[in-house]
Image (tube, coloured by chain):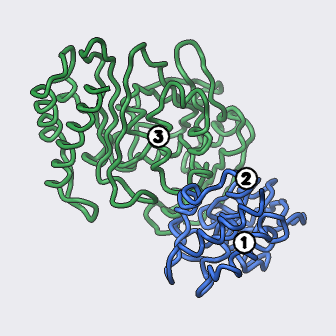
Chain colours: A blue, B green
Amino acid sequence: MSTNIEIRFTVNGSPRTVAVPPEMSALNMLREVIGLTGTKYGCGEGECGACTILVDGMSVNSCLLFAVDCDGRKLTTVEGVVNEPAGARVRDAFVQAGAVQCGFCTPGFVVQAAHLIDTHGSKLDPETIKRGIEGNLCRCTGYKKIVEAITAAAQEAR
Amino acid sequence: MTVEHYYAPKHLDEALEVLRAGNATILAGGTDVMPQSESGKTPLRKTLVNIRRIAELTGIRLAKNEVRIGALTTISEMMANDLIRKHFPILAESGDHFASEQIRNAGTLGGNVCNASPAGDTLVPMLALDAVVELAAKPNGSVETHTTPLGSFLVGPGKTRRAQGELLVAIRIPVPPAGQVQRFFKFGTRPALDISAIAIGLAAVKTKGVLSHVRLAYGAVAPAIMRGSKTEAVLEGKRLTPELIEQAAQAAHDEVKPISDVRASDWYRRELMHNIVKRMLIDVHEH
């Protein structure tokens, strides 16, 4: 029998207290316990990046993060990222560039792209973008429009 | 088995106390523990000990003649650290080939060592750089630490000499001697999120074309990361010439014991060993 562990943290600026089993992933907690379904389950083993979130400002795969390890930390999901300046620009640039096909990978790309813009600022060039999105897979089409969208959003940051 | 007890201690002392009771899974970044427990490969034990809040396990410091890297240092932190970049450029470089940014931001150096993958990306440069691991335990009420060379700590796939009750607290690497050259090469079929077909780390002191203190480490060609001692013996104290380089490349080809798997065949891995060792030594010879 598994005991639930009570943890406190913030998600997109709001404080939360939840009780979760120690085995649960942060991804499952966000989707099933908190009800934020923007973060997607793709592969469950850190290959695809559809579950990318920010924890204390660093991008991580939420499928590899234990929910209990969120205790005391600051989580930002795609729902929160698009309320920040960089995230909002990335969202608009994805629409403008048509960088979305089925859309399943998009939340992960948006979070990772916003993180790249926040980290590199005006120095973010297409080569750095390509290296930075190595952990995000799109299986519909390709990465050309995605890179174009992130480049455009980064340029607006200047 | 489901987890019955969860601990997230803030001090090393408390963590060692919990570990002494046994039957515990140690959790840090989670990037290996989560997929391995989810798939059933390594089920979680009755007690889950999250060591990520222990401040004593963080930080990279220069102490005496070595750099002490706290076990909780993430791959991203390691890559950005000035001491690492200055003294151990091949370790920083191995991070560049490590999984993806999301995983580098979570995965720790201590975790990469304890996961003991035969293809562990940071293990190859660390072995070439004579790293030792620092282990702590609390057998009789007080904390005791000891060190062991990385090469003898790693035993086989997923297997280390870490005893029950012990925690890997740091990795210590000696500051390189003057004139040391370092090289690292990872061969995979794509640049990101790939497991090495082979990886090679080289560290040696080069004086007027002669190599000494030669260390070669090979990844993904044996059950654990291995030292290329036969290749080292060919090179030690000798002047690099095209003939010597060919002889060393042949020794590397002959001394590895690779398996054939989805990433590469035994034959291909040996060919890679020969050709990459040769390419590295030519590069060292010319620069």
The location of residue A73, given as percent across then percent down, is 79, 54
The location of residue A56, given as percent across then percent down, is 76, 53
Query: In the shown orientation, is residue B226 left or right of residue B85?
Result: left
Q: Which residue is mark 1?
A: A29
Q: Is residue A11 above or below residue B158?
A: below
The location of residue B35, given as percent across then percent down, is 51, 64
Q: How many marks?
A: 3
Q: Amino acid at mark 2?
A: Gly
Q: Are marks 2 and 3 in contact (CB under 8 Å)?
A: no
Figure quadrant of residue A9: bottom right
Marks 2 and 3 on same chain: no
The location of residue A59, given as percent across then percent down, is 67, 58
Marks 2 and 1 on same chain: yes
Instruction: Name the chain letter of the residue that bears numbered label 2.
Output: A
The span from disc 1 to disc 3 (Cα, nearest Å) is 35 Å
**Residue at x 58%, y 58% (from the top left corner):** A132
Helix, strand or loop at label 2? It is: helix
Helix, strand or loop at label 1? It is: helix
Q: Nearer the viewer, residue B126 or B242?
A: B242
**Residue at x 61%, y 67% (from the top left corner):** A63
Q: Amino acid at mark 3?
A: Glu
Mark 2, mark 1: which one is toward the viewer? 2
Q: Which residue is mark 2?
A: A121
The span from disc 2 to disc 3 (Cα, nearest Å) is 23 Å
Which numbered marker is on residue B93?
3
Q: Is residue B34 above or below residue B66?
A: below
**Residue at x 50%, y 82% (from the top left corner):** A141
Of mark 2 and mark 1, the one earlier in the sequence is 1
Q: Amino acid at mark 1?
A: Met
Query: In the shown orientation, is residue A11 left or right of residue B69?
Result: right
Neighbour class for label 1 at 10 Å: few (<14), some, many (≥20)? Answer: many
The span from disc 2 to disc 1 (Cα, nearest Å) is 31 Å
